[in-house]
Amino acid sequence: MAKTMFNKGNTTNTGKMANVNAPDRLNRIVEGTSIEGEIKADSNLRIDGFVKGLVQTKGRLVIGTHGKVDGDIICQNADVEGEITGTIKVEELLSLKSTARLTGKIITHKLAIESGAEFTGTCDMGGGKSAMNNIKAGVTVEDILEEHA
């Protein structure tokens, strides 16, 4: 099956949606790259550079040891080795590795924190749908804190 660089619709020849977790569907922001704005992806995303703004993916998000996000994140699963300042909403599992530094709010179903990881902020965890629906794209930690004051 031939692939084109600009495939209209993300479908295979059979018409079915492509697997968002397929290895060939990885988006990558490399070290030395800086992006300001909004990133939306249907597949996996790895950030080794700097992103300021909203990051949203339907797949797995990996923030490498040199990666930094200053803004809100919404994803299915996440492995964090780098730095986040903002609110992160993870539908399934958020894994903070030993080198992770997170300042803000966590909303997730499951959380794994390795020894050495740093976290400052609040965490809503568990299966409650109210916690998962509590965050809107573009809402800052300050906005959330003001609502609960």
Image (cartoon, rainbow, N blue to C red):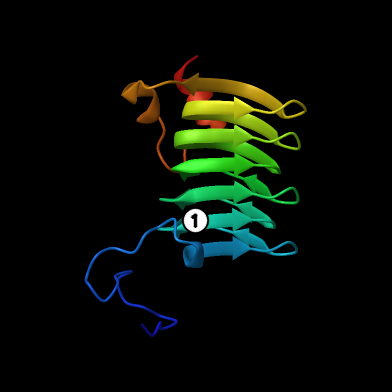
**Identity of the residue furthest to the left in this view:** 15
On screen, 140 above or below 2? above
**Which residue is nearer to you in this view: 25 or 52?**
25
Q: Position of residue 38 (x, y in %)?
A: 50, 56
Left or right: where 138 falls relative to 32: left
Question: Which residue is at a point 35% across and 20% down the rendered structure image?
Answer: 128
On screen, 21 above or below 16? above
On screen, 51 above or below 33? above
Q: Secondary structure at mark 1?
A: strand
Question: Which residue is at a point 36% across and 78% down the rendered structure image?
Answer: 7
Q: Residues within 10 Å of mark 1 (few under 14, many from 20)?
A: many
Question: Is residue 38 at all visible to an observer of this figure?
Answer: no
**Identity of the residue furthest to the top in this view:** 149
Residue hosting label 1: 44
- The N terminus appears in which quarter of the rendering? bottom left
Q: Position of residue 18 (x, y in %)?
A: 34, 64
